[in-house]
Image (cartoon, helix red, strand yellow):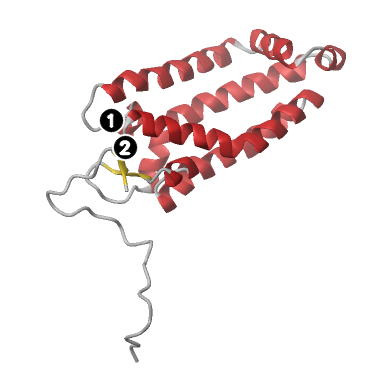
Amino acid sequence: MHNPYQAPVANLDVPFVQEPGAEAEVGGFWLRLAAQLLDVLFMLPFIGLNLWLGSVWRYFYAVWVIPGTLIGMFLTVYLVRRYGGSPGKLVLKLRIQMKDGARITTKAALIRVAPLMVLSLLTSIGTAYAAILMDEATYSSIGFMQRSAVLGASAPIWSTLASTLMQVWMLASIPIMLLNKRRRALHDFLAGTAVVRV
């Protein structure tokens, strides 16, 4: 029996589709940048723990490759698919959706982060390889900045290339985002997505 006084229940799995002719307000460059900074802020304790573990144990980089990738996928694929964005985007009332206004698909969420995920994974594997090859005494005796420089210089060439390509990909997104009306970044074009204000 239907209770007329019962509060309505929202089904979060029903795809969101915009009203025909209604254009959602675009999530602008500065708002998206602020969301990225918020994501980094939320992750600071976690980043600090990683930096500390990486400084006391040279095998940490090798052990961390798979868990780090899985956590990255949780933040950039699962949360995006389930809630429409990362924590920073959700706080700033931004939503990632398909360019036609439909809810983002798992495939689109994966495609959106695939280039950075693959390049990041290659860079992490190269850093782990360099850390394993370094002797324990040298690894323990040098500071964070010097260790990072030595690991970067000792990493295989493909890892250095992956790191450079990752930086190029991120920097290329800025002018592309600024030069189109809907403020879609390179990964948005690749996945067929857009970031809008809720």
Image quarter of the N terminus: bottom left
Residue visible at 42% across and 52% down in the picture: 83
Classify residue 142 by image quadrant.
Answer: top right
Quadrant hosting residue 85: top left
In the picture of the structure, the residue carrying the numbered disc 2 is: 27
Q: Which SS class for mark 1?
A: loop
* Residue 151 horizontal/vertical position (percent): 69, 13
Circle 1 Cα neighbour tier, 10 Å, few/some/many (<14 / 14–19 / ≥20): many
Could you tell me residue 108's position as x and y percent? 35, 41
> In this figure, which residue is indicated by the disc labeled 1?
183
The kind of residue on which mark 1 rests is Arg
Relative placement, left or right, of 53 versus 163 is: right
Between discs 1 and 2, the one toward the N terminus: 2
Amino acid type shown at disc 2:
Gly
Mark 2 and mark 1 in contact (Cβ < 8 Å)?
yes
- With respect to residue 126, does 95 lie above or below? below
> How many residues crowd mark 2 within 10 Å: few (<14), some (14–19), many (20+)?
many
**What is the x, y in percent for residue 39?**
52, 37
